[in-house]
Image (cartoon, rainbow, N blue to C red):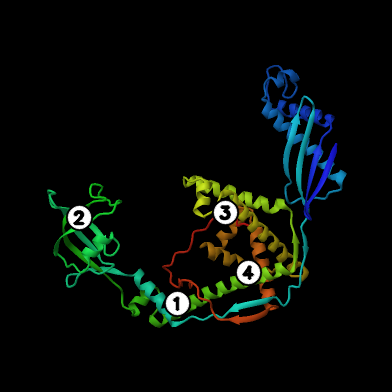
Amino acid sequence: MEVTREELNPCTIKLTVVCDAEQVKVGFDKALKQIAKKIKLPGFRPGHAPKSMIEGLISRDELYETATDIIVRDSFKKALDQEEVHPDTTVRPTVELIKLDRDKPEAEYSAKVPLPPQVELGDYKGLPLEKTRIDVTDEELDQQIEDFRKRKQTRETVTDRGVETGDAAVVNIKAEGEEGEGRNFMTIAGQMFPALNEAMEGMKVEEMKNLELSFPENFQEKDWAGKTLKVQLTLNSLSGVKLPDVDDAFAQSLQTENVQDLRNRIREALASAKQQMVRDMSTEQLLEKLHERSTVHVSDNMWEALAAQRMQETAQEQQKAGKSMEQYAAENGMTVEALYDAWKSKAKMHIERALLIREVFTKEGMQLSNEELNRELYAMAGEYGVEAEQMFNMLRENNALDELQFRTISRKVSDFLEANAEITEVDPAAQAEPEAEPVAEAKPAKASKKKAEA
């Protein structure tokens, strides 16, 4: 057996293995015996029928596939021993068959072998951190209250004014020369096609107009679509939006005691959302700086496997939606190849950061308490909108309890890095503010049983 070794990177080697003729013969013999055990022939015990009879009952593809598995399995371990390679047993090697011929006989394959990760931790104390000051303004608070008012809005009949943007109106349109009473349309003022929006503006109930209307190509009435017609336009009914007053009754409808209590709860919710956003931004900064100061090597197999899994899951999701991966990639302004490369890059970063987090945890001699694990479990349950017990059962059923452990480790390391960072406070950057959901009517997201990515 000949083995050629190529160092791809500090944690990945490529072995090209050329098997001896005897190894190939033995591999095919084992494959025949293995397949024969599954075949029942009258007069023979399973696995004891003549080889000539068995070969006539199995396909070449099945034989070669089984033989490949056996030949690679038996020779790969010998190749590792011969080259004194100690692979990372938590990651599968990637094998590519180069040639396999039973008649010659010959077999050759290459294997990308993962080695254990290498982490050289840089100085993780005194990392620079720009931390945004948290400030909830009255304008933000008022905007949130206005949003809640819009959620509680009602409509009331309007008779004393003309049409305004946002009003709901029923209009009748009758084309010149058309028999009957015309056609009724329920509309929202300002959201129809431009000519109709302009014509409706200021009209009062029962008012009638004679005019020309240019209908868009995609108009719902196909016989009018794309045409300019002389029509008679009549406003049959009109209703406007009525926003509730900001009083104690409004506050109580949002399950708070009074207006002041509502404002306090919204302020607290906004502050909490901003704190979480700042925390996430701080963690991202700290890990990025730690990554820059450190050296991490991981096998290609680790992040390629994650990216391939993500690719497969996305392809299945798109297939259910009636789309191809090409369509999905195009919607994101990319090719499928570019999308896969982006996922590989992201997976590599996630894995390297996870290794750095564990390295800090180990170097500092940290341990997790039951209280910390429970706190993280409740946080996860809140994110998924389920009870803590249900969250625990979901993780256990999906063999994902290690995710709970790693999240707890990550939070502890993040807190440690921030406590030892060189912090500079900065003013809030102009960005979309988080939306407060301080009241019970806000619906949590449904839980997903899919295990999170590393």
Query: Disc 4 versus disc 3: distance between alpha carbons?
Result: 24 Å
298 vs 271, left or right, is right
For the C terminus, the quadrant is bottom right
Q: Amino acid at mark 4?
A: Glu
State if disc 3 and disc 4 touch (CB < 8 Å): no
Q: Amino acid at mark 1?
A: Ile
Query: Disc 4 versus disc 2: distance between alpha carbons?
Result: 56 Å
Q: Secondary structure at mark 2?
A: strand
State if disc 2 and disc 1 touch (CB < 8 Å): no
Crowding around mark 4 (Cα neighbors within 10 Å: few <14, some 14 to 19, many 20+) is some
Residue plotted at (74% across, 18% down): 52
Q: Amino acid at mark 3?
A: Lys
Residue linked to disc 3 = 450
Classify 85 as above or below 39: below
Query: Disc 3 versus disc 2: distance between alpha carbons?
Result: 48 Å
Residue linked to disc 2 = 184
Disc with the residue nearer the chain's start (4 vs 3)? 4
Classify 132 as above or below 406: below
Query: Disc 3 versus disc 1: distance between alpha carbons?
Result: 32 Å
Residue in the foreground of this view, choosing between 434 and 439? 434
Residue plotted at (77% across, 28% down): 28
174 vs 248, left or right, is left
Q: Secondary structure at mark 4?
A: helix
Mark 3 or mark 2: which is in front? 2
Q: Secondary structure at mark 3?
A: loop
Checking the image for residue 266, the label placed there is 1
Residue plotted at (21% across, 57% down): 213
Query: Disc 1 versus disc 4: distance between alpha carbons?
Result: 27 Å
Disc with the residue nearer the chain's start (1 vs 2)? 2
Instruction: Evaluate whether residue 332 shows in this view.
Output: yes
Checking the image for residue 284, the label placed there is 4
Q: Amino acid at mark 2?
A: Asn
